[in-house]
Amino acid sequence: MTDGFLALSGLTLAYGGTVAVDRLDLAMAEGELVALLGPSGCGKTTTMRAVAGLLQPRAGTIRLAGRDITHVPANKRGVGLVFQSYALFPHLSVFENVAFGLRLAGTGRDEIGRRVAEVLAMVGLTGFERRLPKELSGGQQQRVALARSVVVRPRLLLLDEPLSNLDARLRLEMRSELRRLQRELGVTMVYVTHDQAEALALADRIVVMREGQIEQEGPPETVYTRPRTAFVARFMGFETCLAVNGGRLVAPDGRSLPLEGAADAPALAWRPHGVVLGRGPHTARVLGRSYLGQSVEYLLETDAGPVKAEAAADAPRFEPGTTVAFDLPLAAAARLESAA
């Protein structure tokens, strides 16, 4: 049995004959913010839906604060849910959208007014009570969705890619707001995302999922700097992942480069900024170049396949089609347990 404020034990979820999550074990402490991170189809949203009560497990249990809620209806779980699409009622004002759950619960009028005012102040929407959703920006609509979930005082708050519809600036603002709100309320949160930057910025712990199972979990710093497999490494920005075999760096298709030095791992991975350009024992052809502002990114064709490299914007430029020396220094590599 997995212990924790939220405990998923042997959770198996399926759509028809297709198993989406297979015997998942996961525990969360009270007040923790855990990010479920992974590509589309990895099972992260399916897991969240099961916790919310929107999908019945094929096997396993879900416990919240020691109570088995596996077969408890969604509206009896004490769980809040924030959707990617906000799901606001277009004909209701901001006040009425936020008050909706309280009215369903039979909360008194004065208490509704007090609690709605309190959460609108928390999310910076005091004075917007009479506006309709169509009169709000995307960021403001997201704040209303958060306020609506928080006002009912859930013990657990689930967020399904809540920032994906916002522009880059608003995403940064809302990350800070979410973290502030979570700390202020002390609510336990599960945050579903495919964006590693969001997971790193928000989470106390990251759970990387792959094909319905947990590939790696741990504090953001650990997952970012010490990925265990090539799958996690690539998700954390290590663009070049190569197996180590017989003193060579070997690509999945069998192409290889000589390894300079001795590696104590079955596979190594490099981020683009860890690849040295303009000097080194290897040569490559420059396939493309992209200006990123503070840096320039290069795509190289090497004897071990494509390699991404990054250099400072004021460094010497290498034109597409030219040959360039490069190095994959061991000091900049992450040691992986698996090349898969």
Image: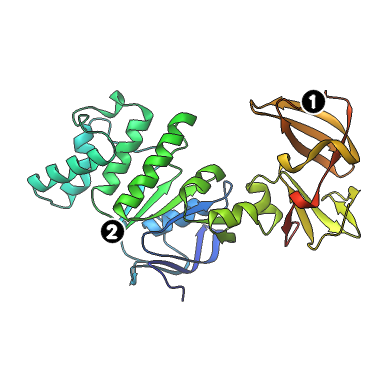
State the residue position of label 2.
78
Secondary element type, mark 2: loop
Q: Nearer the viewer, mark 2 or mark 1?
A: 1
* Residue denoted by label 1: 316
98 on left or right of 252: left
Q: How is the image coloured?
A: rainbow
Name the residue: 49% across, 45% down: 201
Look at the image and tell me whether residue 323 can be seen: yes
Q: Which mark is residue 85?
A: none
- Residue 156, image x, y percentages: 34, 57
Give how far across and how far down residue 1 sits, in percent: 46, 76
For marks 2 and 1, the one nearer the N-term is 2
User: In the rendering, at what x and y percent does residue 104 appear?
Assistant: 18, 49
The amino acid on which the numbered mark 1 sits, given as a three-letter code, is Pro
Q: Nearer the viewer, residue 327 or 212?
A: 327
- Looking at the rendered structure, the secondary structure element under dot 1 is loop
Give the residue drawn at x 74%, y 43%.
Answer: 274
Pointer 1: residues within 10 angstroms few (<14), some, or many (20+)? few
Q: Nearer the viewer, residue 77 or 37?
A: 37
Q: Is residue 106 above or below residue 132?
A: below
Residue 260 as seen in the image, left or right of residue 191: right
Image-quadrant location for residue 17:
bottom right
Above or below 144: residue 74: below
For the view shown, which residue lies furthest in the bottom direction?
1
For the C terminus, the quadrant is bottom right
* Tag count: 2
